[in-house]
Image: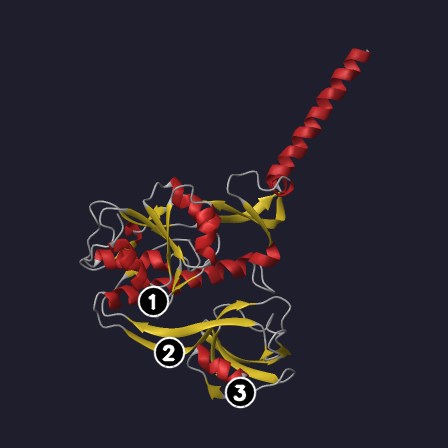
């Protein structure tokens, strides 16, 4: 009888343990997990009228798998090689959730495609018309007055009734204010326009009046030829440099010289390459794709990429022209 109860107890305990482990594997936590994804060729996504793909080598883009971490992953620090865990407050936009983040990421991807096409076509000698239309909100910082008022990808078109054409115009307009002043921002969000009033605070170091946002120039782009890019549900601006390189390659410029080249970095209308996130995972993804070199934004991104390169050649670039020169001299 004791043996019967002992066996039954062990069986029940085993079922409970299996149920607990199963729940930990299924139930999501409040944290996000970043995982590497192998680099992908850009050419199948890009259509340039009359364009040609390289016979050898090519341009590759790298992305990051981002999802809610399961409880077991949260408890044991990721459980995957190259994984990083982040609280939702660092990933989702302030005042928003996963759905808002996905919308912002897809909008950033669309914008990066247009800018990449403009930069590549201009490098190929094509006439590209870019018209400044305001200052785009790139980031809203936590615990600042802009939270809940402004969102990433909002375009500021006027401040206190004065038109805004560039990021510099916003800086000049804000310089006229003192901390505690209320500033009226005219913004365009998607297809709607509105005026948002925000009370300023003092920037801790300079004591300037701020509302807590990072900006970049917003431009309206008119291309001389119809370049299309279909990246599916991949979001974010970090594939811009890879898109620009591939478009120029398809236009007839020999960019890769037979090499497999991975690239990451936000491409800006003036051709400069801006920093991106997930460098650790993207470097691992480039390495696993066995590319010959990995182009990354100069500065902290390049420093981090070298920590995980493990023999992969890392090329730090500040702008599109520098990227072209580096590839032209790559052995």
Task: Sort mark 3 into few (<14), some (14-19) or many (20+) by Cα contacts within 10 Å.
Answer: some
Q: Position of residue 290 (x, y in %)?
A: 35, 40
What's the CA distance linking mark 3 and mark 2?
19 Å
What's the CA distance linking mark 1 and mark 2?
15 Å
Sooner in the amino-acid sequence: mark 1 or mark 2: 2
Q: Position of residue 27 (x, y in %)?
A: 62, 42
Q: Position of residue 39 (x, y in %)?
A: 38, 46
Report the mark closest to the observer, 1 or 2: 1
Cβ atoms at labels 3 and 2 below 8 Å apart: no
Quadrant housing residue 327: bottom left
Report the mark closest to the observer, 3 or 1: 1
- Residue lying furthest right in this view? 2
| Residue 271: numbered disc | 1
Q: Is residue 10 above or below residue 240?
A: above
Q: Residue at x 53, y 87 (%)?
A: 160
Quadrant housing residue 204: bottom right
Q: Position of residue 21 (x, y in %)?
A: 64, 33
What's the CA distance linking mark 3 and mark 1?
31 Å
- Residue located beneath label 3 in the image: 160
Residue 229 visible in this rendered orientation of the protein: no
Does residue 148 appear left or right of residue 242 in this picture?
A: right
Circle 1 SS class: loop
- Residue located beneath label 2 in the image: 132
Residue 140 visible in this rendered orientation of the protein: yes
């Amino acid at each position: 009888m004791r043996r019967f109860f002992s066996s039954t107890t062990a069986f029940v305990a085993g079922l409970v343990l299996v149920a607990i482990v199963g729940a930990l594997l299924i139930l999501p936590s409040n944290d996000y997990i970043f995982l590497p994804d192998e680099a992908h060729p850009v050419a199948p996504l890009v259509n340039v009228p009359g364009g040609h793909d390289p016979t050898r080598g090519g341009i590759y883009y790298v992305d990051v798998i981002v999802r809610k971490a399961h409880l077991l992953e949260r408890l044991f620090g990721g459980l995957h090689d190259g994984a990083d865990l982040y609280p939702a407050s660092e990933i989702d936009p302030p005042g928003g959730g996963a759905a808002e983040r996905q919308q912002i990421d897809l909008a950033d991807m669309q914008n990066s495609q247009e800018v990449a096409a403009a930069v590549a076509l201009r490098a190929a000698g094509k006439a590209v018309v870019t018209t400044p239309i305001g200052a785009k909100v790139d980031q809203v910082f936590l615990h600042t007055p802009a939270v809940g008022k402004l969102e990433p990808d909002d375009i500021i078109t006027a401040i206190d009734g004065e038109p805004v054409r560039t990021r510099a115009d916003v800086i000049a307009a804000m310089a006229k204010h003192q901390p505690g002043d209320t500033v009226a921002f005219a913004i365009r969000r998607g297809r709607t326009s509105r005026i948002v009033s925000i009370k300023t605070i003092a920037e801790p170091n300079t004591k300037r009046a701020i509302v807590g946002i990072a900006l970049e120039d917003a431009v309206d782009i008119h291309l001389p030829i119809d370049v299309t890019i279909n990246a599916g549900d991949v979001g974010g601006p970090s594939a811009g440099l890879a898109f620009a390189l591939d478009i120029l390659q398809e236009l007839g410029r020999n960019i890769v010289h037979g090499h497999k080249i991975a690239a990451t970095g936000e491409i800006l209308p003036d051709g400069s390459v801006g920093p991106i996130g997930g460098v650790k995972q993207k470097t691992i993804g480039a390495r696993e794709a066995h590319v010959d070199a990995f182009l990354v934004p100069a500065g902290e991104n390049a420093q981090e990429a070298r920590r995980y390169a493990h023999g992969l050649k890392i090329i730090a670039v500040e702008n599109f022209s520098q990227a072209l020169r580096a590839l032209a001299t790559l052995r």
